[in-house]
Amino acid sequence: MLVKVFGSAVYGVEATTITVEVNVDKGVGYHLVGLPDNAIKESSYRIAAALKNNGYELPVKKITINMAPADLRKEGSAYDLTLALGILVASGQLPADELDRYIIMGELSLDGSLQPIRGALPIAIKAREEGFKGIMLPLQNAQEAAIVDDLAVYGIENVMQVIDFFSGNLELQPTVVNTRDEFFKSQDFPEFDFADVKGQESIKRCMEIAAAGGHNIILIGPPGAGKTMLAKRLPSILPPMTLREALETTKIHSVAGKVKEVGLISQRPFRNPHHTASSVSLVGGGSYPQPGEISLAHNGVLFLDELPEFKREVLEVMRQPLEDREVTISRAKFTITYPSSFMLVASMNPSPGGYFNDPDAPVTTSPAEMQRYLSKISGPLLDRIDIHIEVTPVPFDKLADRQRSEGSSIIRERVIAAREIQTQRFSELNHIHYNAQMNTQLIRTYCELDATSLTLLKSAMERLNLSARAYDRILKVARTIADLEAAPTVQSAHIAEAIQYRSLDRDGWLG
Protein backbone atom coordinates (compact mmCIF):
# COMPACT_ATOMS: atom_id res chain seq x y z
CA MET A 1 0.00 0.00 0.00
CA LEU A 2 1.29 3.45 -0.94
CA VAL A 3 0.70 6.40 1.39
CA LYS A 4 1.71 10.08 1.21
CA VAL A 5 2.44 12.11 4.36
CA PHE A 6 3.61 15.73 4.36
CA GLY A 7 6.51 17.26 6.24
CA SER A 8 8.62 20.38 5.69
CA ALA A 9 12.25 21.41 5.24
CA VAL A 10 13.71 24.83 6.05
CA TYR A 11 16.23 26.45 3.70
CA GLY A 12 17.39 29.87 4.84
CA VAL A 13 14.34 31.44 6.50
CA GLU A 14 11.81 29.86 4.12
CA ALA A 15 10.22 26.40 4.27
CA THR A 16 9.64 23.88 1.48
CA THR A 17 6.95 21.19 1.73
CA ILE A 18 8.34 17.64 1.62
CA THR A 19 6.15 14.76 0.42
CA VAL A 20 7.04 11.52 2.24
CA GLU A 21 5.90 8.54 0.15
CA VAL A 22 5.78 5.24 2.05
CA ASN A 23 5.27 1.91 0.29
CA VAL A 24 4.96 -1.39 2.20
CA ASP A 25 5.25 -4.49 -0.01
CA LYS A 26 6.22 -8.16 0.08
CA GLY A 27 9.79 -8.84 1.02
CA VAL A 28 12.18 -7.66 3.73
CA GLY A 29 14.17 -4.42 4.05
CA TYR A 30 14.04 -0.77 4.94
CA HIS A 31 14.96 1.57 2.09
CA LEU A 32 15.04 5.35 2.64
CA VAL A 33 15.79 7.54 -0.41
CA GLY A 34 15.53 11.22 -1.35
CA LEU A 35 18.87 12.60 -0.05
CA PRO A 36 18.34 12.06 3.71
CA ASP A 37 21.23 12.79 6.09
CA ASN A 38 22.48 10.41 8.80
CA ALA A 39 20.02 11.70 11.42
CA ILE A 40 17.10 10.72 9.14
CA LYS A 41 18.68 7.37 8.23
CA GLU A 42 18.97 6.53 11.94
CA SER A 43 15.26 7.28 12.42
CA SER A 44 14.28 3.64 11.77
CA TYR A 45 15.72 2.63 15.15
CA ARG A 46 13.90 5.44 17.00
CA ILE A 47 10.64 4.73 15.16
CA ALA A 48 10.81 0.95 15.83
CA ALA A 49 11.40 1.45 19.57
CA ALA A 50 8.76 4.21 19.90
CA LEU A 51 6.09 2.12 18.13
CA LYS A 52 7.01 -1.05 20.08
CA ASN A 53 6.73 0.81 23.41
CA ASN A 54 3.27 2.06 22.45
CA GLY A 55 1.75 -1.24 21.30
CA TYR A 56 2.51 -1.06 17.56
CA GLU A 57 5.00 -2.83 15.33
CA LEU A 58 7.36 -1.92 12.52
CA PRO A 59 6.10 -4.33 9.80
CA VAL A 60 8.49 -7.13 8.86
CA LYS A 61 8.09 -6.36 5.15
CA LYS A 62 9.83 -4.37 2.46
CA ILE A 63 9.44 -0.71 3.43
CA THR A 64 10.41 1.86 0.78
CA ILE A 65 10.31 5.55 1.70
CA ASN A 66 10.93 8.40 -0.73
CA MET A 67 11.31 12.01 0.42
CA ALA A 68 10.32 14.24 -2.51
CA PRO A 69 11.59 16.41 -4.10
CA ALA A 70 14.40 13.85 -4.18
CA ASP A 71 17.09 16.30 -5.31
CA LEU A 72 16.85 18.47 -2.16
CA ARG A 73 19.03 17.57 0.81
CA LYS A 74 16.98 16.78 3.96
CA GLU A 75 18.52 16.99 7.40
CA GLY A 76 17.70 16.55 11.07
CA SER A 77 15.54 14.29 13.18
CA ALA A 78 12.30 16.25 12.76
CA TYR A 79 10.90 13.73 10.23
CA ASP A 80 10.60 10.87 12.78
CA LEU A 81 6.88 11.43 13.40
CA THR A 82 6.17 11.92 9.68
CA LEU A 83 7.87 8.62 8.77
CA ALA A 84 6.27 6.72 11.69
CA LEU A 85 2.74 7.74 10.69
CA GLY A 86 3.41 6.90 7.04
CA ILE A 87 4.59 3.40 8.02
CA LEU A 88 1.56 2.81 10.29
CA VAL A 89 -0.91 3.86 7.58
CA ALA A 90 0.89 2.01 4.75
CA SER A 91 0.94 -1.20 6.83
CA GLY A 92 -2.79 -0.93 7.62
CA GLN A 93 -2.38 -0.24 11.35
CA LEU A 94 -3.93 3.25 11.11
CA PRO A 95 -6.67 4.77 8.89
CA ALA A 96 -5.47 7.29 6.31
CA ASP A 97 -8.44 9.70 6.47
CA GLU A 98 -7.39 13.37 6.42
CA LEU A 99 -3.69 12.48 6.78
CA ASP A 100 -2.90 14.50 3.66
CA ARG A 101 -4.48 17.68 5.12
CA TYR A 102 -1.78 18.17 7.78
CA ILE A 103 1.92 18.95 7.94
CA ILE A 104 3.34 16.55 10.55
CA MET A 105 6.78 17.04 12.14
CA GLY A 106 8.53 15.92 15.33
CA GLU A 107 11.52 14.05 16.72
CA LEU A 108 10.63 10.82 18.54
CA SER A 109 12.11 9.61 21.80
CA LEU A 110 12.24 5.85 22.36
CA ASP A 111 9.17 6.04 24.62
CA GLY A 112 7.15 7.84 21.93
CA SER A 113 7.36 11.34 23.41
CA LEU A 114 8.25 14.22 21.11
CA GLN A 115 11.28 16.50 21.20
CA PRO A 116 11.17 20.12 19.87
CA ILE A 117 12.20 20.94 16.31
CA ARG A 118 13.75 23.96 14.55
CA GLY A 119 11.97 26.31 12.17
CA ALA A 120 8.39 25.83 13.41
CA LEU A 121 7.36 29.36 12.39
CA PRO A 122 8.52 29.23 8.72
CA ILE A 123 6.98 25.74 8.47
CA ALA A 124 3.62 27.03 9.76
CA ILE A 125 3.72 30.01 7.36
CA LYS A 126 4.34 27.66 4.41
CA ALA A 127 1.57 25.29 5.55
CA ARG A 128 -0.95 28.14 5.52
CA GLU A 129 0.28 29.36 2.11
CA GLU A 130 -0.24 25.90 0.60
CA GLY A 131 -3.74 25.48 2.03
CA PHE A 132 -3.16 22.76 4.64
CA LYS A 133 -5.86 22.42 7.29
CA GLY A 134 -3.38 22.25 10.15
CA ILE A 135 0.06 21.38 11.45
CA MET A 136 1.07 18.82 14.09
CA LEU A 137 4.33 19.34 15.91
CA PRO A 138 5.85 19.01 19.42
CA LEU A 139 4.09 20.87 22.23
CA GLN A 140 7.19 23.01 22.89
CA ASN A 141 6.86 24.52 19.38
CA ALA A 142 3.09 25.09 19.46
CA GLN A 143 3.16 28.69 20.79
CA GLU A 144 5.69 29.67 18.14
CA ALA A 145 3.73 28.11 15.25
CA ALA A 146 0.38 29.43 16.54
CA ILE A 147 1.54 32.98 15.71
CA VAL A 148 0.27 32.10 12.20
CA ASP A 149 -3.49 32.61 12.06
CA ASP A 150 -6.00 30.69 9.87
CA LEU A 151 -4.13 27.46 10.61
CA ALA A 152 -4.97 24.80 13.22
CA VAL A 153 -1.81 24.20 15.27
CA TYR A 154 -1.76 21.06 17.42
CA GLY A 155 0.92 20.68 20.08
CA ILE A 156 1.66 16.98 20.56
CA GLU A 157 3.34 15.38 23.59
CA ASN A 158 3.32 11.71 22.52
CA VAL A 159 2.96 9.70 19.30
CA MET A 160 -0.18 8.03 20.76
CA GLN A 161 -2.02 11.37 20.69
CA VAL A 162 -1.55 11.57 16.91
CA ILE A 163 -2.52 7.93 16.42
CA ASP A 164 -5.67 8.37 18.55
CA PHE A 165 -6.52 11.61 16.70
CA PHE A 166 -6.45 9.96 13.26
CA SER A 167 -8.24 6.87 14.66
CA GLY A 168 -11.05 9.14 15.86
CA ASN A 169 -10.51 8.23 19.55
CA LEU A 170 -9.19 11.64 20.64
CA GLU A 171 -10.18 15.22 19.89
CA LEU A 172 -7.20 17.55 20.06
CA GLN A 173 -7.60 21.24 20.88
CA PRO A 174 -5.58 23.60 18.67
CA THR A 175 -3.24 26.10 20.30
CA VAL A 176 -4.58 29.63 19.85
CA VAL A 177 -2.42 32.77 20.18
CA ASN A 178 -3.74 36.29 19.71
CA THR A 179 -0.62 37.57 18.00
CA ARG A 180 -1.30 41.29 18.47
CA ASP A 181 -2.31 40.97 22.14
CA GLU A 182 0.72 38.77 22.93
CA PHE A 183 3.01 41.15 21.07
CA PHE A 184 1.96 44.30 22.92
CA LYS A 185 1.64 42.52 26.27
CA SER A 186 5.23 41.27 26.16
CA GLN A 187 6.84 44.61 25.29
CA ASP A 188 8.33 45.18 28.73
CA PHE A 189 10.85 47.94 29.23
CA PRO A 190 14.47 46.64 29.11
CA GLU A 191 16.25 45.99 32.40
CA PHE A 192 19.18 48.37 31.73
CA ASP A 193 18.53 52.12 31.97
CA PHE A 194 20.64 55.17 31.08
CA ALA A 195 19.56 56.72 34.40
CA ASP A 196 22.19 54.43 36.02
CA VAL A 197 25.02 56.06 34.00
CA LYS A 198 26.91 58.81 35.85
CA GLY A 199 28.35 61.59 33.68
CA GLN A 200 29.17 60.63 30.07
CA GLU A 201 26.62 63.12 28.70
CA SER A 202 28.43 63.46 25.36
CA ILE A 203 28.46 59.67 24.93
CA LYS A 204 24.77 59.44 25.76
CA ARG A 205 24.17 62.09 23.10
CA CYS A 206 26.05 59.90 20.57
CA MET A 207 24.00 56.88 21.60
CA GLU A 208 20.81 58.88 21.10
CA ILE A 209 21.90 59.94 17.59
CA ALA A 210 22.92 56.35 16.74
CA ALA A 211 19.55 54.99 17.94
CA ALA A 212 17.57 57.71 16.15
CA GLY A 213 19.16 57.00 12.76
CA GLY A 214 20.14 53.32 13.14
CA HIS A 215 23.84 54.25 12.81
CA ASN A 216 26.80 51.99 13.59
CA ILE A 217 28.97 53.30 16.43
CA ILE A 218 32.39 52.53 17.93
CA LEU A 219 33.39 53.51 21.49
CA ILE A 220 37.11 54.07 22.14
CA GLY A 221 38.41 54.39 25.67
CA PRO A 222 40.57 52.93 28.46
CA PRO A 223 39.46 49.99 30.63
CA GLY A 224 36.75 50.90 33.15
CA ALA A 225 35.53 53.98 31.26
CA GLY A 226 32.05 52.46 30.85
CA LYS A 227 32.03 51.30 27.20
CA THR A 228 30.28 47.97 27.84
CA MET A 229 27.86 49.52 30.33
CA LEU A 230 26.80 52.15 27.76
CA ALA A 231 26.48 49.59 24.95
CA LYS A 232 24.21 47.32 27.01
CA ARG A 233 21.84 50.23 27.57
CA LEU A 234 21.44 51.07 23.89
CA PRO A 235 18.44 48.72 23.34
CA SER A 236 16.57 50.61 26.07
CA ILE A 237 16.35 53.73 23.86
CA LEU A 238 15.62 52.02 20.56
CA PRO A 239 12.02 52.34 19.28
CA PRO A 240 9.73 49.38 20.11
CA MET A 241 9.67 46.67 17.45
CA THR A 242 6.85 46.72 14.94
CA LEU A 243 4.84 43.53 14.42
CA ARG A 244 6.53 43.06 11.03
CA GLU A 245 9.99 43.31 12.60
CA ALA A 246 8.98 40.92 15.40
CA LEU A 247 7.85 38.29 12.86
CA GLU A 248 11.08 38.69 10.83
CA THR A 249 13.22 38.31 13.95
CA THR A 250 11.23 35.34 15.29
CA LYS A 251 11.61 33.51 11.95
CA ILE A 252 15.40 33.75 12.11
CA HIS A 253 15.55 32.65 15.76
CA SER A 254 13.12 29.82 14.96
CA VAL A 255 15.41 28.50 12.19
CA ALA A 256 18.34 28.62 14.65
CA GLY A 257 16.27 26.75 17.27
CA LYS A 258 16.48 29.63 19.76
CA VAL A 259 12.76 30.26 20.27
CA LYS A 260 11.73 28.32 23.36
CA GLU A 261 8.11 28.60 24.50
CA VAL A 262 7.81 32.39 24.31
CA GLY A 263 6.20 32.53 20.86
CA LEU A 264 6.74 35.94 19.28
CA ILE A 265 10.00 37.78 20.06
CA SER A 266 9.00 41.34 20.93
CA GLN A 267 12.27 42.69 22.38
CA ARG A 268 15.03 43.87 20.05
CA PRO A 269 17.86 41.28 20.07
CA PHE A 270 21.17 42.16 21.72
CA ARG A 271 23.91 39.78 20.61
CA ASN A 272 27.33 39.88 22.25
CA PRO A 273 29.66 37.25 20.69
CA HIS A 274 33.04 36.59 22.29
CA HIS A 275 36.15 37.71 20.41
CA THR A 276 37.15 34.06 19.81
CA ALA A 277 34.14 33.71 17.45
CA SER A 278 34.86 32.25 14.01
CA SER A 279 33.73 33.84 10.76
CA VAL A 280 31.11 31.09 10.28
CA SER A 281 29.60 31.67 13.73
CA LEU A 282 29.46 35.41 13.03
CA VAL A 283 27.99 35.51 9.52
CA GLY A 284 26.44 32.04 9.35
CA GLY A 285 27.20 29.00 7.24
CA GLY A 286 28.45 25.47 7.89
CA SER A 287 27.83 22.26 5.90
CA TYR A 288 24.11 22.70 6.65
CA PRO A 289 23.95 26.51 6.75
CA GLN A 290 22.58 28.13 9.89
CA PRO A 291 22.14 31.86 10.64
CA GLY A 292 25.10 33.50 12.39
CA GLU A 293 25.27 36.20 15.04
CA ILE A 294 24.72 39.04 12.54
CA SER A 295 21.41 37.49 11.45
CA LEU A 296 20.36 36.71 15.02
CA ALA A 297 20.91 40.44 15.70
CA HIS A 298 18.54 41.38 12.81
CA ASN A 299 16.40 44.39 13.85
CA GLY A 300 18.52 44.72 16.98
CA VAL A 301 22.08 45.33 18.17
CA LEU A 302 25.31 43.40 17.55
CA PHE A 303 27.90 44.34 20.21
CA LEU A 304 31.54 43.49 19.48
CA ASP A 305 33.50 44.14 22.67
CA GLU A 306 37.28 44.62 22.32
CA LEU A 307 37.07 44.86 18.53
CA PRO A 308 40.84 44.53 17.77
CA GLU A 309 40.89 41.21 19.65
CA PHE A 310 38.69 39.64 16.95
CA LYS A 311 40.62 37.95 14.14
CA ARG A 312 41.02 40.29 11.19
CA GLU A 313 39.52 37.81 8.71
CA VAL A 314 36.45 37.49 10.96
CA LEU A 315 35.90 41.26 10.90
CA GLU A 316 36.47 41.48 7.16
CA VAL A 317 33.61 39.09 6.35
CA MET A 318 31.24 41.62 7.97
CA ARG A 319 31.97 44.33 5.41
CA GLN A 320 29.48 43.18 2.78
CA PRO A 321 26.61 42.39 5.24
CA LEU A 322 27.08 45.82 6.87
CA GLU A 323 26.59 47.48 3.48
CA ASP A 324 23.87 45.23 1.98
CA ARG A 325 22.01 44.39 5.23
CA GLU A 326 21.83 40.74 4.20
CA VAL A 327 24.31 37.90 3.96
CA THR A 328 24.40 35.36 1.13
CA ILE A 329 25.88 31.91 1.79
CA SER A 330 26.72 29.97 -1.37
CA ARG A 331 27.21 26.22 -1.61
CA ALA A 332 27.72 23.96 -4.65
CA LYS A 333 24.03 23.10 -5.05
CA PHE A 334 22.19 25.99 -3.38
CA THR A 335 22.41 29.58 -2.19
CA ILE A 336 20.81 30.90 1.00
CA THR A 337 20.26 34.53 1.97
CA TYR A 338 19.71 35.58 5.59
CA PRO A 339 18.65 39.12 6.53
CA SER A 340 21.15 41.02 8.70
CA SER A 341 19.92 44.57 9.23
CA PHE A 342 21.46 45.36 12.61
CA MET A 343 23.11 48.20 14.48
CA LEU A 344 26.80 47.51 15.04
CA VAL A 345 28.12 48.74 18.38
CA ALA A 346 31.84 48.12 18.84
CA SER A 347 34.22 49.00 21.64
CA MET A 348 38.00 49.04 21.84
CA ASN A 349 40.89 50.20 23.98
CA PRO A 350 42.97 52.91 22.31
CA SER A 351 46.12 50.75 22.62
CA PRO A 352 47.17 47.26 23.76
CA GLY A 353 47.93 48.66 27.21
CA GLY A 354 44.63 50.50 27.19
CA TYR A 355 45.84 53.98 28.17
CA PHE A 356 47.04 55.69 25.00
CA ASN A 357 46.32 59.47 25.08
CA ASP A 358 45.83 59.35 28.88
CA PRO A 359 48.20 61.96 30.41
CA ASP A 360 48.05 60.34 33.87
CA ALA A 361 48.96 56.84 32.77
CA PRO A 362 52.49 55.55 32.06
CA VAL A 363 53.32 54.98 28.39
CA THR A 364 53.79 51.21 28.08
CA THR A 365 53.15 50.73 24.35
CA SER A 366 55.68 51.30 21.59
CA PRO A 367 54.62 52.88 18.26
CA ALA A 368 55.21 49.55 16.50
CA GLU A 369 52.91 47.74 18.96
CA MET A 370 50.29 50.45 18.54
CA GLN A 371 50.39 50.11 14.75
CA ARG A 372 50.13 46.32 14.94
CA TYR A 373 47.17 46.58 17.34
CA LEU A 374 45.22 49.13 15.30
CA SER A 375 46.00 47.47 11.96
CA LYS A 376 43.67 44.62 12.96
CA ILE A 377 40.79 46.95 12.08
CA SER A 378 40.85 47.81 8.41
CA GLY A 379 40.07 51.25 7.02
CA PRO A 380 37.15 49.93 4.90
CA LEU A 381 35.52 48.45 8.03
CA LEU A 382 35.93 51.73 9.96
CA ASP A 383 34.45 53.58 6.99
CA ARG A 384 31.26 51.58 7.50
CA ILE A 385 30.96 52.78 11.11
CA ASP A 386 29.17 56.13 11.12
CA ILE A 387 30.07 57.38 14.60
CA HIS A 388 33.47 57.16 16.35
CA ILE A 389 33.53 58.54 19.89
CA GLU A 390 36.14 58.62 22.64
CA VAL A 391 34.98 57.55 26.10
CA THR A 392 36.90 59.04 29.01
CA PRO A 393 36.82 57.79 32.62
CA VAL A 394 34.22 59.42 34.86
CA PRO A 395 35.73 61.66 37.59
CA PHE A 396 35.04 60.83 41.25
CA ASP A 397 32.70 63.76 41.92
CA LYS A 398 30.40 62.55 39.13
CA LEU A 399 30.49 58.98 40.40
CA ALA A 400 29.64 60.10 43.94
CA ASP A 401 26.78 62.33 42.73
CA ARG A 402 23.52 60.79 43.98
CA GLN A 403 21.34 62.65 41.51
CA ARG A 404 19.89 60.38 38.82
CA SER A 405 20.63 61.39 35.24
CA GLU A 406 18.18 61.41 32.36
CA GLY A 407 16.43 58.04 32.03
CA SER A 408 16.07 55.82 28.96
CA SER A 409 12.31 56.46 28.70
CA ILE A 410 12.86 60.21 28.11
CA ILE A 411 15.63 59.65 25.55
CA ARG A 412 13.50 56.98 23.86
CA GLU A 413 10.66 59.46 23.29
CA ARG A 414 13.02 61.76 21.35
CA VAL A 415 14.35 58.80 19.36
CA ILE A 416 10.82 57.65 18.47
CA ALA A 417 9.89 61.19 17.35
CA ALA A 418 12.97 61.31 15.06
CA ARG A 419 12.20 57.84 13.68
CA GLU A 420 8.63 58.89 12.88
CA ILE A 421 9.99 61.76 10.76
CA GLN A 422 12.16 59.22 8.90
CA THR A 423 9.25 56.77 8.50
CA GLN A 424 7.20 59.50 6.80
CA ARG A 425 10.18 60.53 4.65
CA PHE A 426 10.74 56.99 3.36
CA SER A 427 7.09 55.88 3.38
CA GLU A 428 7.09 55.13 -0.37
CA LEU A 429 10.28 53.02 -0.21
CA ASN A 430 9.94 49.35 0.76
CA HIS A 431 13.41 48.62 2.12
CA ILE A 432 14.41 52.00 3.59
CA HIS A 433 13.11 52.81 7.08
CA TYR A 434 15.72 55.07 8.71
CA ASN A 435 18.63 57.34 7.78
CA ALA A 436 21.45 54.79 8.07
CA GLN A 437 19.85 52.78 5.23
CA MET A 438 19.93 55.68 2.74
CA ASN A 439 21.77 55.08 -0.51
CA THR A 440 23.77 57.73 -2.38
CA GLN A 441 20.80 58.94 -4.38
CA LEU A 442 18.67 59.46 -1.25
CA ILE A 443 21.55 61.23 0.51
CA ARG A 444 21.77 63.72 -2.37
CA THR A 445 17.98 64.26 -2.16
CA TYR A 446 17.52 64.66 1.60
CA CYS A 447 20.90 66.09 2.69
CA GLU A 448 21.21 69.22 0.58
CA LEU A 449 23.73 71.68 2.05
CA ASP A 450 23.99 75.46 1.95
CA ALA A 451 27.24 77.24 1.04
CA THR A 452 28.47 77.51 4.67
CA SER A 453 27.93 73.80 5.32
CA LEU A 454 29.65 72.85 2.05
CA THR A 455 32.71 74.92 2.92
CA LEU A 456 32.88 73.39 6.40
CA LEU A 457 32.57 69.85 5.07
CA LYS A 458 35.15 70.45 2.31
CA SER A 459 37.65 71.72 4.89
CA ALA A 460 37.09 68.67 7.11
CA MET A 461 37.39 66.25 4.18
CA GLU A 462 40.75 67.74 3.13
CA ARG A 463 42.14 68.04 6.66
CA LEU A 464 41.14 64.53 7.78
CA ASN A 465 41.70 62.94 4.35
CA LEU A 466 38.27 61.30 4.45
CA SER A 467 36.99 58.77 1.90
CA ALA A 468 33.86 59.18 -0.21
CA ARG A 469 32.11 56.67 2.05
CA ALA A 470 33.02 58.72 5.16
CA TYR A 471 31.59 61.77 3.38
CA ASP A 472 28.25 59.96 2.99
CA ARG A 473 28.35 58.83 6.63
CA ILE A 474 28.80 62.41 7.86
CA LEU A 475 25.79 63.52 5.81
CA LYS A 476 23.65 60.66 7.16
CA VAL A 477 24.55 61.47 10.78
CA ALA A 478 23.93 65.20 10.17
CA ARG A 479 20.49 64.33 8.76
CA THR A 480 19.70 62.38 11.94
CA ILE A 481 20.86 65.26 14.18
CA ALA A 482 18.54 67.55 12.20
CA ASP A 483 15.67 65.06 12.67
CA LEU A 484 16.21 65.03 16.45
CA GLU A 485 15.72 68.80 16.35
CA ALA A 486 12.81 68.44 13.87
CA ALA A 487 14.75 70.70 11.46
CA PRO A 488 13.58 70.43 7.83
CA THR A 489 17.08 70.98 6.37
CA VAL A 490 20.64 70.05 7.33
CA GLN A 491 22.43 73.09 8.74
CA SER A 492 26.10 73.89 9.39
CA ALA A 493 25.74 73.14 13.15
CA HIS A 494 24.51 69.63 12.32
CA ILE A 495 27.45 69.08 9.93
CA ALA A 496 29.93 70.37 12.53
CA GLU A 497 28.62 67.95 15.18
CA ALA A 498 28.65 65.02 12.73
CA ILE A 499 32.29 65.75 11.79
CA GLN A 500 33.25 65.52 15.48
CA TYR A 501 32.13 61.90 15.47
CA ARG A 502 34.95 60.70 13.24
CA SER A 503 37.66 60.28 15.94
CA LEU A 504 39.53 57.49 14.21
CA ASP A 505 40.00 59.63 11.08
CA ARG A 506 42.08 62.19 12.98
CA ASP A 507 45.87 62.37 12.93
CA GLY A 508 47.45 60.37 15.75
CA TRP A 509 45.12 57.38 15.53
CA LEU A 510 45.69 55.41 12.36
CA GLY A 511 48.24 57.69 10.68
Image (cartoon, rainbow, N blue to C red):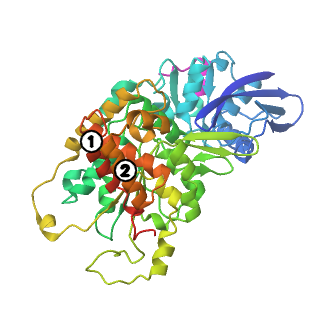
Q: Is residue 157 above or below residue 470?
A: above
Residue displayed at 42% across by 76% down: 352
Q: Magenta span covers which residues?
A: 162-173
Q: Position of residue 142 (x, y in %)?
A: 49, 31
Which residue bears the numbered disc 1?
Answer: 189
Query: Relative to the observer, which residue lies in front, 211 or 404?
Result: 211
Question: Callout 1: 10 Å neighbours few (<14), some, many (20+)?
Answer: some
Residue displayed at 69% across by 33% down: 84
Q: Hey, what amino acid is under mark 2?
A: Leu
Indicate whether residue 103 is drawn in magenta: no
Secondary structure found at label 2: helix
Q: Is residue 31 above or below residue 387?
A: above
Q: Hey, what amino acid is under mark 1?
A: Phe
Looking at marks 1 and 2 on the same chain, the residue that comes earlier in the sequence is marked by 1
Which residue bears the numbered disc 2?
Answer: 457
Query: Relative to the observer, which residue lies in front, 123 or 170?
Result: 123
Residue displayed at 34% across by 47% down: 210
Secondary structure found at label 1: loop
| Quadrant hosting residue 35 | top right
Q: Position of residue 228 (x, y in %)?
A: 34, 60
